[in-house]
Amino acid sequence: MHRYLVPFNPKQTPHFFTDVLVIGAGIAGLRAALAVPPGIDVLVVTKDSIQQSNSAYAQGGIAGVLSPEDRFEHHVDDTLIAGAGLCDPAIVDLVVREAPEQINDLINLGCKFDLEEGQLALTREGGHSHRRIVHALGDATGFEVMRAIITRAKQTPNITIWDDTFTLDLLTDNGRCVGALVHRPNQGKLLIWAKQTILASGGAGIVYRETTNPPVATGDGMAAAYRAGASLRDMEFMQFHPTVLYVAGSSRFLISEAVRGEGAYLRDKQMDRFMLKVDPRAELAPRDVVAQAIVRCMERTKHPNVYLDLRHLDTALVKKRFPGIDKMCRGFGLDITSDLIPVRPGAHYMIGGVTTDEKGKTSIPGLWAAGEVTSTGLHGANRLASNSLLEGLVFGSACARGAIEAASKMPDQVAACGVAITWGSAIAKPPAADIDVADITNSLRALMVRNMGIIRDRAGLEEAGHDTAFWCRYVLAREFTQRAGWELQNLLTIARLMIHSALAREESRGVHFRSDFPERDEAWKRHIICPPPADIFAD
């Protein structure tokens, strides 16, 4: 594996300087940017338009203890139970206790959450013991939250936003992050020098053919951090959302867990409410339990999906609570108040990622990370519903505090010419003109569904490892000049790490289920750290 995706010569590449560089414009990245005070310059880069992030597509809401019936201890316990023994209790407690303040901050930023009788409306989702999920526009919480945050960010003088900016790699000098190498369509490659860098680039759901994620979620930040030497862990834990609309030939649309939180049933093709036989919490069991149960049901019934049933719920409530889902389903001729909704699981959230501490520090000095790109210890082996936006807010704020403190101690003048960027990076790689990027990308995504899906075994994982190793040998060694090629290289990198970790964990825990090791084994109650590139990648 090469250190950089593309060759560059620092003497011939334009330079840009900033105090704090934020990579990613989802909830974690923009929350971090907004926490930086005047007088400290922040540059936010995002590879697509600023509206394109997993955060904007979040339907359910944000979890927080906001009612007198609820307690911090309840939210902590629910998170720990869902996490299947791998959560960091101190991190869970920190995040849960900060939730009400973060939600209040969003309101002050202009976010309009749904109300009932003048109070925040709260709903319940799988794995939660109490109604504690705030939501907006019924089922479009992410859209409303990001609308408010983006509006404020654009109005903040010390924040500069560059969209259509692909982060190729992190720049390091003697093991310290000093910024990033990026590509902009009209300018080509640029070197961004930053006193401190915050990585908030999101997840990698596009590594699977069936996913709720938008096309931008290709794991670029994780892969760049790995090439730079950052510690990554728990890459075997990809969470699959149990209920994704399944209409053959169409895109896969998320059907929020809040639908089940409001009382919807899951039924098989014989109309049996099968979750009653699986878990006492039935449809409100944690996502790993429900997703695995749906897969087993589909195998048992030889049917490509199961069904969500809302027909017994109040029609007016359903239409008010889920206007976005209602509109989307009507586009396929489905009425959610009277029709059964075909659903099946789809890749949803990357639990593993760049290892951070409670302040958002990574293993690379000068590099902080927040949001889905990270492994903070909050989610363990299975994320509790509506804890993800909360994590982005809490750690985005934490990263900003740390970056501000560090940047304020550094001089404004950066001697770029004195930075020890490896000159080997200027060596050109063979061109990639003969590689069919779309074909390999589609093949990889299909392979991951087939062999690295909800239910795994050694034979399937070894086959996936063999195939991805073959692709890596000739794809990672080439030089691409377009975004699709760089994304393929990043997807292959992430896939290799995921498969390696899944083979290593010889047990079933949370979202990782091995049919050849179907029980949880406390000997594996530990994190799996990704080895350095030289150990699993061959140039």
Image: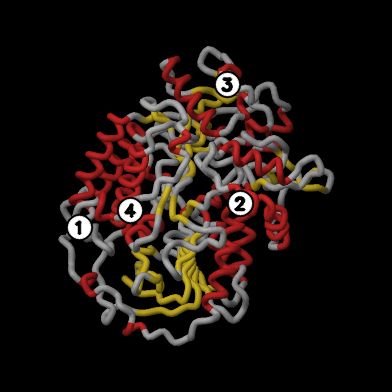
Q: Which residue is mark 3?
A: 275
Q: Which residue is mark 4?
A: 490
- Which residue is at a point 45% across and 32% down the rendered structure image? 521
As drawn, which residue projects farthest toward the front? 523
Q: Quadrant of residue 479?
A: bottom left
Residue 127 image label: none
User: Could you tell whether 437 is left or right of 235 in the image?
Assistant: left
Q: Earlier in the sequence, mark 2 or mark 3?
A: 2
Marks 4 and 3 sit apart, C-alpha to C-alpha, by 37 Å
Q: Nearer the viewer, residue 199 or 76?
A: 76
Three-letter residue code for mark 2 = Ala
- Which residue is at a point 62% across and 61% down the rendered structure image? 149
Q: Which residue is mark 2?
A: 90
Marks 1 and 4 sit apart, C-alpha to C-alpha, by 13 Å
Marks 4 and 2 sit apart, C-alpha to C-alpha, by 32 Å
Marks 3 and 1 sit apart, C-alpha to C-alpha, by 48 Å
Three-letter residue code for mark 1 = Arg
Q: Which residue is mark 1?
A: 478
Q: Do the numbered discs 4 and 3 sit on residues whose CB atoms are within 8 Å?
A: no
Q: Label 3, secondary structure: give it.
A: helix
Can you tell which of label 3 and label 1 is closer to the viewer? 3
Q: Earlier in the sequence, mark 1 or mark 4?
A: 1
